[in-house]
Image (cartoon, rainbow, N blue to C red):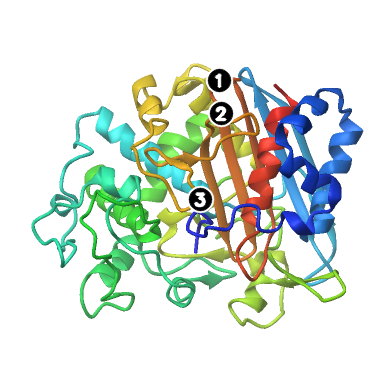
Amino acid sequence: MRSAAVVPRVFALVGAIGLSFAACAAQPRQAANASTALTDADKDAFIQLTMRSAGLPGLQTVVVKNGRVVWAKSYGNAVLDLPGPRRAMTNDSVLFSASVAKILVTVAVLQQVEKSRFSLDDDINQFVPFKVRNPAWPDVPITWRMLLTHTSSMKSEDDERASATETYGRDASMTLDDYAKNAFVPGGSYHWAERFASGKPGTERIYSNDAFDLAGSALQSIVHEPLYKYIDEEILAPLGMKNTSYWIAGRRSAPYAVAYASVRQKDGRYDYVPAKIYWAHGQPSGSAFDYQMTAPNYASGTAHTTALDFARLMLMLMNGGAVDGKRILQQSSVDLMMTPIGLRNLDGWAQGLGLAGPKDIHGRQVWGHDGEDRGAANALYINRETGVGAIAFANAMDPGFTMTYVVVDLDLHLMSWFE
């Protein structure tokens, strides 16, 4: 599972955060007004209390305002005693992106739309060598727009099916095209006969990782190179996102954080078990590098990155598609990403094109993406009205996959502090 957006449990962990945090969540307007007098030490204390109460071993935070980074702080640990050696989280520690990296795929698709290579409403079947249709609606095309707005009628994958693609300590050998073929052609290794819901494509919002993996595979037939290479050349390099990569080969010396399962005990303490052991049932061995995960279906969000790197992407979106004189998207494409389609997720958050979002603590719409996976809880959100955006990336996930709501709430508080 690459994202938390499918679980209707907003702030499910707030009760564990402590009285001060719970009061902020219950009375957001009062908290926001009081926050104007907060010192940096107060903000640090709030974040650290949240981490202790929610069970976050490490965290990176970034705030952008008016086109520049105004806050970049890291807390806790990137690596604990297992696998060791223990290492503090820093701003350059490399974490797992989870679904926040879906933004990269949306940007890549829109770049090609701007070049008139295809339309968002074109049938995806024109760009893949197999047929993709909802059996209940065989005459209804599934379009790029549906894939990027989670309205294709594809269901979200179950945990067992998703984990079957994961590889630890090395790059996955299967290609994205091979994964897509195995996922959508009957008889394939990852084919799922019940993939589609009964509703008509385009009429309901159902979160789907495979929708983005399919879009990524289809895009490769247009750009005539692997998606990861295209994204590196046309998005990451121009934005200066030097610490972001879908792959780990040749990067053994990178300062990787380890992803953990955060398991709360009856006495309130947390046990931290590396994701490789807890979810993938691997054996404890090697360095932090050997605990890094890759997957062939990387378009749905398996990049390795830092919050500061993704701040570059956030700056681009907040600045109408360009940063430091380098244009990645047209303003109209950025506007499209942050235009509600009229459908919402189960938590009531508005859905845009590749982006979604809740209301901030003043009731204003914010746009971005959260992400959760085995050992990652991340959130990136932008308030276009105030010109403030925030990122919180953590290296843990609870077994119930609710931790993302904590980092989303942190984002909303970070934005309110810097208005």
Image coordinates for residue 177, horizontal then vertical, percent: 29, 61
Q: Is residue 143 left or right of residue 75?
A: left
Mark with earlier residue (2, 3): 3
Q: Which mark is residue 385?
A: 1
Please name the amino acid that badge 1 sits on.
Glu
Alpha carbon distance from label 2 to label 3: 16 Å
Q: Which mark is residue 347?
A: 3
Where residue 63 appears, x then y in whole percent? 69, 31
Say which label, 1 or 3, has the lower sequence index: 3
| Secondary structure of the residue carrying numbered label 2 | loop
Q: Residue at x 27, y 54 (%)?
A: 152
Between the C-alphas of marks 1 and 3, the distance is 22 Å
User: According to the image, label 2 marks what residue?
Assistant: 364
In the picture shown, does residue 355 fall above or below 293? above
Front residue of this view, candidates 12 and 309: 12
- Which residue appears at 89% of the width and 42% of the height? 45
